[in-house]
Amino acid sequence: MNQSFDLVVLGAGSGGLAAAKRAARHGARVAIVEGDRVGGTCVIRGCVPKKLLVYGSQMAEQMEEASSYGVHPSEVRIDSSQLLANMRAEVDRLNAMHIEFLAKAGVTLIQGWGRFEDDHHILVSTDPGGDPQHRLQAERVLIGVGGRPQRPDIQGVELGWVSDDMFLLERFPERMVVVGAGFIACEFAGILSGLGVEVTQLVRREHLLRGFDAELAGVVQEGMAEKGVNLQFTTIPKSIEGTPGDLVVRTDRGDRIACGGVLLATGRRPFLKGLNLDAAGVSTQGNRIPVDADQRTNVSHVFAVGDVTDRICLTPVAIDEGRAFADSIFGDRPRQVDHELVASAVFSQPELATVGLSEENAIAQYGADGVVIHRARFRSMAQALPKRGPRCLLKLVLEAETERVLGCHMVGEHAAEIIQMAAIAVGMGATKADFDRTMALHPTVSEEFVTMG
């Protein structure tokens, strides 16, 4: 099939979907090419199903604490197979919903794997690199194929799982090893531990969550250890041995850790394989596609958004990049995405959320004397009767001279929900005085942001 489009989008993930629908709304004739399910990493194998697993993993602990509130559940039985099945059913619903949204927007969905024939033509095949079933002519092309998990170079690595695999399991094993220190590793360690899995987490360095505020990462580390995750720092896996379901991880310390599964949460990288970028003359930089502030590659009519550019790999960023591209090119409403102030969260247990500069980054930028820190550390009221659970940490990073809030950070219950609203204030340039004169909403965790000295 030969067809001509104003825009061909490669990849039906968050950024690609946003761009395709917005461009079609502006009157462009749009096709989107996807070899997998529609929805991308976030919807199919990332933040959405993972957050459902987080909720599920918290239920048993809530039941354990219920007696302190006078509620006595008759039975607490964890069935991870039912949770996984229900999660997949919800993913199926979302996949169908996104396909319907494309149809309503007038976007042509072409199932298959796309690759460049040249800078204006896309070949689409059922299998990556196979014989093409479609040849699409594109005035412009947008690359939004996202990223994929990467595996470390160790013996027996094929016996381990990556994060994508976790959503396809029928049930979780009784014991697991999680390799990694980033947000995916910490989130899955909390999920698994909450579902009764015995978890050992191997961390190459001495701390979790590199790149986040160190004090907040330390509070997450304390909370994870309190919830039973066996954290082993400065430890590197050297090999995975055995058969599926009956594995042994050997470490550089000489330890042998028996387990039923190994999660290799050791990072992600852009998924450039099979795109045939050379045929279009699209340049790469390492494992990423570099773009300018308008999402444009070195080829003037080829653009890229989302994780494939390896800038800020977050769903809302990819969506805004996609919409900004469509508004600028097809809507005569040029705008660029501001990547300077982006809130982020780690759905670990306890939860972490942050916006703005960490204490370390603020000191590096303004100097130690140019930064003032305010913090509050306490156990939330939700834990007053159970008398257990990690303490919260709320933290403001200020510029000393103006008392402008440079960073707003939190570890604790509903951290992401609270920081989302705080991000508005930080983005508007709020000062400590602005926070102080905001009347507290009592009794809440978030009131500490407007009452701390």
Image: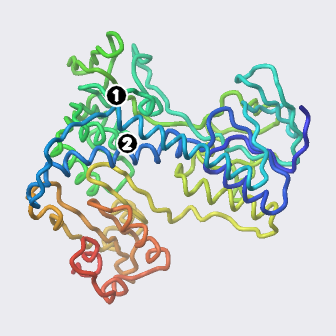
Point out residue 13 in the picture as x, y percentages from the top left corner: 62, 45
Residue placed furthest toward the bottom: 437
User: Can you see residue 298?
Assistant: no
Residue drawn at 74 percent across, 39 percent down: 33
Q: Nearer the viewer, residue 3 or 123?
A: 3
Disc 1: which residue:
171
Residue drawn at 82 percent across, 61 percent down: 330
Residue drawn at 30 percent across, 41 percent down: 191
Q: Amino acid at mark 2?
A: Gly
User: Can you see residue 253?
Assistant: yes
* Number of numbered discs on residues: 2
Q: Amino acid at mark 1?
A: Arg
Whether 112 is drawn above or below 309: the answer is above
> Disc 1 vs disc 2: Cβ atoms closer than 8 Å?
no
Q: CA distance from mark 1 to mark 2?
A: 24 Å
Residue 408 vs residue 202: left or right? right
Whether 154 is drawn above or below 434: the answer is above
Q: Secondary structure at mark 2?
A: loop
Point out residue 271 in the picture as x, y percentages from the top left corner: 61, 34
For the residue carrying disc 2, how many other residues have a C-alpha within 10 Å: few (<14), some (14-19), or many (20+)? Answer: some
Residue placed furthest toward the front: 74
Point out residue 326 in the picture as x, y percentages from the top left corner: 75, 59
Disc 2: which residue:
182
Residue placed furthest toward the top: 242
* Location of residue 67 by image quarter: bottom left
Quadrant, the C terminus: bottom left
For the residue carrying disc 1, how many other residues have a C-alpha within 10 Å: few (<14), some (14-19), or many (20+)? Answer: some
First reached walking from the N terminus: tag 1 or tag 2: 1
